[in-house]
Amino acid sequence: MAIDKESEEFSIKTIDLTKKFAKKKHRGIFGFLRKNKQNNKHNEVTVALDELNLSIRPGELFGLLGPNGSGKTTTIKCLATILIPDKGRAIVNGFDTQKETAMVRASLGMVVGGERTLYWKLTARDNLAYFASLYKMPRKKAKRRIEELLETFNLSDRADERLEDYSTGMRQKVAIARALLHDPPILLLDEPTLGLDPSFARQIRRKIRELSEKQGKTVLLTTHYMNEAEQLCDRVAFINNGRIVAVDTPNRLKARVKEKEIVEISVYNPPTDIERQIHSLLPDAEVVKLIRGNEDDGSPSKIKIIGGTAEEHIGTVIDTLRQNKVRIGSLNVGFPTLEDVFIKLTGAKLTEDGT
Amino acid sequence: MDKSKREHRLREVNCPTGLNWSNLKAELKAVWESYIKDWKIEFAYPVSFIRQLISPIVYLLPFMLYGIALVGGRYSPNLEQMVGTGDVVTFTFTGYMLMGFIGTAVWAMGFSIRRERWFGTLESIYVTPSSRLGQVLGMALHSTVHQMLGTIIQFIFIYLTFGIGLKIEGTLPALAIFALMMLALYGFGIVISALGLILREGWVVSDALYSIMMILSPVAYPLVVLPTIAQNASALFPTAPALIGIRSFLMENYHAEAFGNVFLHLLLLGTAWILFGVLVFHLTDGYVRKRGMLKKF
Amino acid sequence: MTQHATQQSVYSSNLSIIWNEVVKNIKTLLAYPTIIVFWAIFPIFWFIPFILQGEAFVGGLESSSFAEITGTGEYIPFIVIGAILSSYVNTLLYGMGENIRKEAYQGTLDYVLAAPCNKAYVLIGKAVSESLSSTIFAISQLTISVLLFGMNITLGVMIPVSFIIILLILGLYGMSLLMAAFSLMYKQSYDLSESIGYIFYIFAPVRYPVESLPIWAQIIGKFIPLTYALIIVRSLMLLGTDLSTVYLDVIALLIIDVVLLLAGLYLFNKIEKKTRKSGIISHH
């Protein structure tokens, strides 16, 4: 089987991947009587992927970050061969997704849609046994692997109960266990912690980290939780309107945005010229502001420093305040988030509420 | 583990593919596991399981009672004139006995893929290296066995209630005809399962096809009752030649109509439907993946 | 607000619930034109085999044995009437249970149950919308049958027939309430609906005269509203009688209707309270 030289060094590579959907409007039996106010067309074309180029190295934990409708799930589905792109190519583990479909499928484990992609009327063990057969695993090997995975995910005690009696988090664990059955080198995880409570979400993230660091798996993770991407990913790509907007490590991406760095110090009895003093120490700062509080009522004053390199010079700022015999109540440093980076690069928000 | 020193995992997959014994074994195992899975899910709905076992009796009884009311007993001189035997009870039973297996093709197989979409498991199945046809065949096998159980219960009920006159020595050739009929029905069912993926109200198609096949098959009446054009159309479906062939082996004095060598006819039909079914399935598979239709409607 | 005005207000809001439920269900149905066409035409295909079976066994369009039992040898109109009425029953009975199951599946059932209105009016709305659609389908099927099979129907006979169908619908409403109650309680209510359909199909004279059944089966049939409806309608349309001739069957149908409606209302309210207490709804 020919090895694709173009993608030999990458676990996953997409080349000008394009996907469009023509959405037919269901207008019902009397639809012809109703005029479409926006346009007269019956079909809208949505560009889900617009010449997407992505390269993921073996063993990398790669995040794909974008708002709803940006093309994250479409990317995953094209890589997983359940969607055929209109143009371009995708190479997974050296296999072309359109020409060597079976080998691509054997190379990956996918978690898309989570708990609703399992048979609720079957037990965890039955679910895993069934999917093991679909991955063409020999019976004995499958049995061993299932027991191993049930143990790993702490499901052994309830392995013979139906999934309908499981919690959402437990079902998600079964979904992940299924993706790992055949020990694939590549995992595609589409919003794996969506809808989970914080404790389960933490467990899942820990597991994902382990799979990448200890087992060397290549993981492509899509999420719109920026803190998840920051915590887990070696590199993050921003996707918006089907295109990659930026790719880099989370820290380097955040470094592109300086203006939202905020340092807030609550102080008691500051001198009147403290703003000038701090500004002289931080010439790069955009704003240094003293907001007087009502100290008789116990509300401290606040010094806000926006932009610049406050984080690096914070020690000097504190020394200055001490020299001026200013009592410091608290110190908060607001680092720019990936959301801030995304907004700066695209003008759009990652989530509606900015979380 | 230091990432920079991590071993590259490019191309380390063990998965049989292509035309070889190893892959065939793996695909057959997937079919078997699909069959087992369907039984396990079925047993999770015990009321449904029992109901479906008795439904062959429920749907046969009206034909029986109606037929008996029409002729005032179990003998019809007009039927005897047409096919050589006037035993309305045995005639109706042998017809209806096979009718249930049409349900295997249009309902069970027709809904196999669609049902997975309804469960939410279709995409998970598509991502595996096994053939999607395995799902359909697993469901077909499950439905066939299910229908056989129902038919046995039906047979016992009708035998005890009405009495049936069948030639035991005709059982083996009748079974051979049955097997050939099922081959063709499986091919037909594969076509329906493919259509079920792309049509929003697939059950309408299944019901329509079931009704049409019911009319075109000599289940409750001899084929000669139909207009000529309908008799010719019935040659395209396996149930008509199968029913005629099975009756000629199982019923005393029954003389065959129209189709000549039933075995050859069914073999050709079976081959044609299987090939056509696989082709349609393959084309539809590509179509739904192109249009992104694997999600639920 | 005076007591009278309060009562008026409650009354009009209950009517409004029924109306809105009907509008919602009809709009939903109109979004599926394929299903409308299917139900308007396809039930005819289901009874064509019976007609052909008749031709094969009898060798003509009339059966003397049939005439001895039913009073008419014309088996085709006999079958057509049975088919259309049973199709009517099916769409009503299954429609209600299916409606509730869809609400549960879509996640809207919780909100319907949490609303402060009396849920019986919601169900009545569902039943009315199912009756409306079933009636339209039945008219379509009857029209096609008249054209295809040459049945004679006089407008005069349709008035008492419509009255009997209304009585049948009332009885079916009662059954629908019972099945709706079970839909709330048991996830396998579809099988219950189907099983009740089986009972109707075998013990009511849908495809054959009731006299074809053994006595014990005929007794069971006497508890099914469809049995009386079929006997009365066939008597009116095929034998040219009027309601006074079959008044005993009309009274029996009325009694069954009252029993089913009361039992249905009572059980639905009881089970609805129970399911809200046990939280079973959210398990659907």
Image (cartoon, coloured by chain):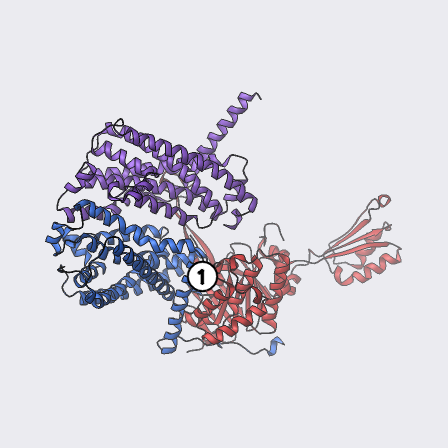
Chain colours: A red, B blue, C purple
Say above or below: A217 vs B152: below
Quadrant where the image shows the N terminus of chain A = bottom left
**At which x and y percent is residue C157?**
24, 29
Direction from residue C235 to residue A226 in the image, left or right: right
| Image quadrant in which you'd find residue C86 | top left
Position in image of residue C238 (x %, y %): 21, 34
Task: Say which of A88 and A307 sits in front.
Answer: A88
Number of labels in the image equals 1
Amino acid marked by disc 1: Glu
Percent of width and height locating residue A292: 81, 46
Image position of A75 (left or right of B161): right
Residue A54 visible within the image: no
Q: Of residues B98 and A11, which is closer to you in this image?
A: B98
Q: Against C202, is B265 above or below?
A: below
The residue that disc 1 covers is: B123
From the viewer's side, name the closer residue of B82 and B195.
B82
Q: Is residue C197 above or below residue B96?
A: above
Secondary structure at numbered mark 1: helix
Occupied quadrant, residue A313? bottom right
Q: Chain of mark 1?
A: B
In this view, the residue farthest toward the front is C215
Q: Is residue C2 left or right of residue C126?
A: right
Residue A4 appears anywhere in the view = yes
User: Which quadrant of the view contains residue A324?
Assistant: bottom right
